[in-house]
Structure formats: structure tokens, C-alpha cells
Amino acid sequence: MVSTPAVGTNSGCQYLPHPTTAQPSPNQYLLPLTAQVNSQDHLQIGGCDVPALVRQFGSPLYVLDEQTLRTACRQYRDAFKRYYPAESLVIYASKAWNCLAVCAIAASEGLGIDVVSGGELYTALQAGVDPELLYLHGNNKSLEELQLAIASGCTIVVDNWFELQTLAELTHGKNPLPIMLRLTPGIECHTHEYIRTGHLDSKFGFDPDQLDSVFQFISQQEGLECIGLHAHIGSQIFELQPHQDLAGVMVQWLSKASQHGLPIRELDIGGGLGIRYTESDDPPSIEEWVRVICESVVKACEAQQVPLPKLIAEPGRSLIGSACVTAYTIGSQKVIPGVRTYVSVDGGMSDNPRPITYQSVYRAVVANRMSADCTETVAIAGKHCESGDIVIKQAHLPKTQPEDILVVMNTGAYNYSMASNYNRVPRPAAVLVNQGEASLILQRETYQDLIRQDCIPERLMSKDEG
């Protein structure tokens, strides 16, 4: 595992990646793989000076490193080819960050795309992703979303009886629709309760005791072709044993399906591999995670005497989380003697809701003075009218001043995708950096954008009213 010096008196340079292997696993680093300190003592990512990016594009600013993202995609893709003797497919769980550019990059690396709404599906299609590589999830898909999925030709991952019966009606008398079934494996893992999805008390998936009924129903539907089974046990997981257990359970389901005449040929074991947000985090590497998954499925298939299915995995956070940082401009400070110092930035919970939602912990550096000694422990406060809008409760930083550029690490997953316009704050811009070139992939919203969908009834516009 990669080691990082303890924070406190050391400079922000301690967070720079120092890969010790020929193929460093991006999820094990706090900064993107291309992060360096340049001759101006500035943080540089993808060959681009981060303070200069803020001058050009404004802040807050998401800075996405293309090389780190592509490295993670390739490690997943190549590891499955190396460790699994049958066909495999990696699909990017795009709820982590779904936009045209990110979908296009993942697709260009041979990955499919996992979508969980009509909007995500539409975005992936507009990015040019092959519909045969698109998988639609969701526990309450609307009729319009199901119709879009059917028309586009993607695979639908069916979550419940209501959806299954709706699809049976929509496809009656038509060519068979490829579907997968999401099942709840009843496997617990150590992660935040909001992102545990594999235990039985979950809103997702069919219960295991419904299997025979579900399989029997599908076998009687000419318009439905069940091609696979899906399960997902959660997110930000560092343990490997739950994934081994999942493989065994899913292969048992596969064997049961064959008894109902359903020739299941795809097994989707979900994702969930965690990333390193703090020095104490110790996630497995991408390759180690893939190896355990593949070996477990092969072993389970041999024990059940069933052919190896096409193996699918759907990583999200571990693909993109470490590839992005968010740059802020520091503004006001409030010193409460004997209590704490608040250092405020020009963003917060509207561009990163994870701290207030999940109590997530992040690390930060002052990007325009990377070698300065860290002499203070401060709270990084967001700008929103909310006492809980604290980006980092305890940030170890140099003495800061207004106009310093603060960079928060590992913000590629569930930051932009969960961003809001709380307090009517426009959402930030995002740039893709690679080999010294910065390309805008998301324009900064304007005040005009904020009111674009607003409507005022005509009677409220009348000067004679009241």
C-alpha cells in the first residue's frame, strides 16, 4: 500500500503521488496520478497550473485529470481479461459523475455505461455510447424511462414485481426484450448505512425467497428474455470477503435459474471498491479487487458445475473519484479564540454535499503555496446559509489569506452529480486536463440559467393588481 507522511507540520507536498509500482492504482492516491509541484510552488495537474486554471475559468472549479481516469478504466478492463477465462465487461456506474465527456472517455476505453435514470441514459446516448453497452438500473423507473430504454435497445435491470409486470405488458407480442434481475443477496459490509445496498433491508432488488416465483413468471413471458442476474452490496468498501461471499450466492442463483429453463449468460457483481480519502484509508488496489472477484466466480461455478457466464462489474467511485479535485478561492476568516478558526471558501455544500450528507472527510492543500509548512488546523466553511455547510472540519494547512487557492482532493465521485443550486448558487464549471491542455467540459452556470425554468403567472405581472 502507498504510504503518506502524517499531516501537521509538513507541507502540502506530502500528498503528491509517488507511485511505487509500474501500474499505480488510482484509488489508492489522494491526488490524481499526474499531480506535481511546479517551479512556482503551485499544484499542477495534467500539466496545468491549478491557480492559473482558476484565473482562467473561475472558482469553484472541478479539475478532472484525463490520464488518471483512463488509467483506472484500463486497469479494470485489463485485469478482468487477465484473471477471468471467459468473456467480461466493465461498465462505468455513471451516477458517480454523468456528463457527455466522462461517458465518452469511458466508452472510448471499451467500457459500458450503467445509468439509473432517463437523463443519464439520454446523456450516454448523446455521448455516442453503443446502446448494447448501456444498462438501466433503478428501483422506480417511470413508464417514460422504460419506453426510452426499450426504444434505445439498452438492457434493463429489473428491480421489482411492479416493473417486471409493466415490462411484460409493454413487450407482449413483440421481440424479446433483454433484461437482468436485481437481487438482494443479504450480505452486510462495513460502510455508511446510506450506501449499503446488499443487505435484506434495502429498497433495491428482489428478495431471495421470491426467486422461484420470479423465474417462473419470466419463463412464461414471450416478450422478456432474462439474460443475467445482478447484485450490488454497497459503496466505498475496503473488504474483500463480502465480494467473495457474493460470488458464491450469485452462482447459486444462476444454477436455480437454469432449473426454470432460463439460460442466464451474464452475471453482474456490482462495484463498490473504495478510494483513499484520508491517510488512514487503505483500499485494495483495482487489480487485487478484480482478481478476488474473478477467482471467486470461477471457484463457485466449478462447485456448482455450471458454465462460466459473462462477468460484468460496475465500478463508479474507484474509476473517477481520485481523478478530480475541486479548486476554491479563500475569502473571509473567523477566529474564535480557544475554539476554532473558520476559513471560508466560495463554494461548499452546493458543489459537494457529501460532508453534510454522509459526514465524509476530505483533505485539502493550498495550491498556490504547496511547500509552505502546515501550521494551523482550521475548519473549511462553505458560503451557504447553513451552519452545517462545513467542507472539512479539521484541515491542516499553512496560514491562509484571502485569494489563496484551496484544493480539496478526491472530488470526482458524487460531487458534480449531487450538486445543487441551494441558495441559488450557480453550479461550477469543470475542465478536463491532459498534457498541459485544459478543455471545458461543463460550463459554469449563470444567474440567467437559474431562472430559465421559472414562470411568473401573468396576473402577478399586472401593475394594477392589489
Image (cartoon, rainbow, N blue to C red):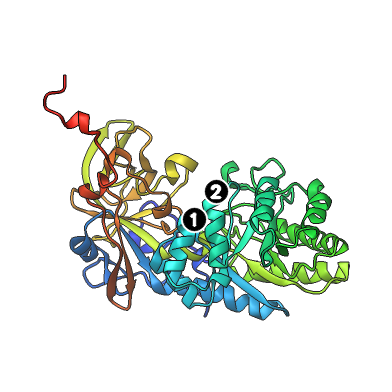
Q: Residue at x 80, y 58 (%)?
A: 220
Amino acid carrying label 1: it is Gly
Q: Residue at x 30, y 49 (%)?
A: 375
Please tell me whether residue 465 is drawn above or below residue 120 in the rendered image: above
Q: Is residue 234 left or right of residue 359?
A: right
- Contact check, label 2 and label 1, Cβ < 8 Å: yes
Position of the C terminus by quadrant: top left
Q: Nearer the viewer, residue 221 or 181?
A: 221
Q: Residue furthest top?
A: 466
Give the residue pinned by disc 2.
142
Q: Quadrant of residue 394?
A: top left
Q: Quadrant of residue 443?
A: bottom left
Residue 362: image location, x then y, percent? 42, 50
Q: Residue furthest front?
A: 173
Q: Is residue 18 visible?
A: no
- Mark 1 neighbour density, 10 Å: few (under 14) some (14–19) many (20 or more): some
Q: Is residue 119 left or right of residue 365?
A: right
Give the residue pinned by disc 1.
118
Residue 335: image location, x then y, percent? 25, 35
Position of the N terminus by quadrant: bottom right
Q: Which numbered disc, 2 or 1, marks the residue that appears first in the sequence?
A: 1
- Mark 2 neighbour density, 10 Å: few (under 14) some (14–19) many (20 or more): few
